[in-house]
Image (cartoon, grey):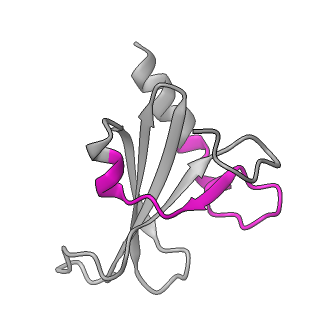
Amino acid sequence: MKLPAIALGLLALTALAHADEPASQWRFTETTLFDLIQNNYNIVAVTSGTARNGASAEDTFFLQKTNSVFKCFESRDANASAKRASGAVECYELTKPGATASAK
């Protein structure tokens, strides 16, 4: 089945996802996690770890619909009892290297 292979590929991209390099293929978008779900995107993988700022925990959701992929970060307090998000969810769209505008 393609889904496990896609999920593994997306997980492999996690290390690249946290890099703020000029050649990054992930572009920030104003699209929300809610909007993506409403537009029939499927969550294909979820990872959890230390947030990019190191002060809290972070869940990363990878969403896919056909050839379009997004990742969304949701931060929460690192305290084990904290179950609610502590900040806004940020979403990024996977783009062709060097792309500046969405091809939608």
Across and down, in percent, residue 53 comes to 55, 82
Magenta highlight on residue 66 = no
Indicate the position of residue 46 as horizontal and vertical percent values.
37, 49
The residue furthest top is 1
- Residue visible at 47% across and 25% down in the picture: 66
Left or right: where 22 falls relative to 48: right
Which span is picked out in magenta? 11-36
Q: Residue at x 79, y 64 (%)?
A: 21
Q: Please give left or right for residue 5 compared with residue 100 in the image.
A: left
Give the quadrant of residue 85.
bottom left
Which residue corresponds to the image point at 52% horizontal and 82% vertical from the top-left? Answer: 54
Would residue 81 appear left or right of 90 to someone viewing this image? left
Answer whether residue 32 is magenta in the image.
yes
Count of labels in the image: 0
> Which of the 4 image quarters holds residue 48?
bottom left
Image quadrant occupied by the C terminus: top right
Q: Nearer the viewer, residue 17 or 90?
A: 90
Q: Residue at x 55, y 57 (%)?
A: 92
- Whether 34 is drawn above or below 10: the answer is below
Q: Quadrant of the N terminus?
A: top left
* Residue 51 percent location from the top left of the image: 48, 74
Q: Would residue 82 appear left or right of 89 to someone viewing this image?
A: left
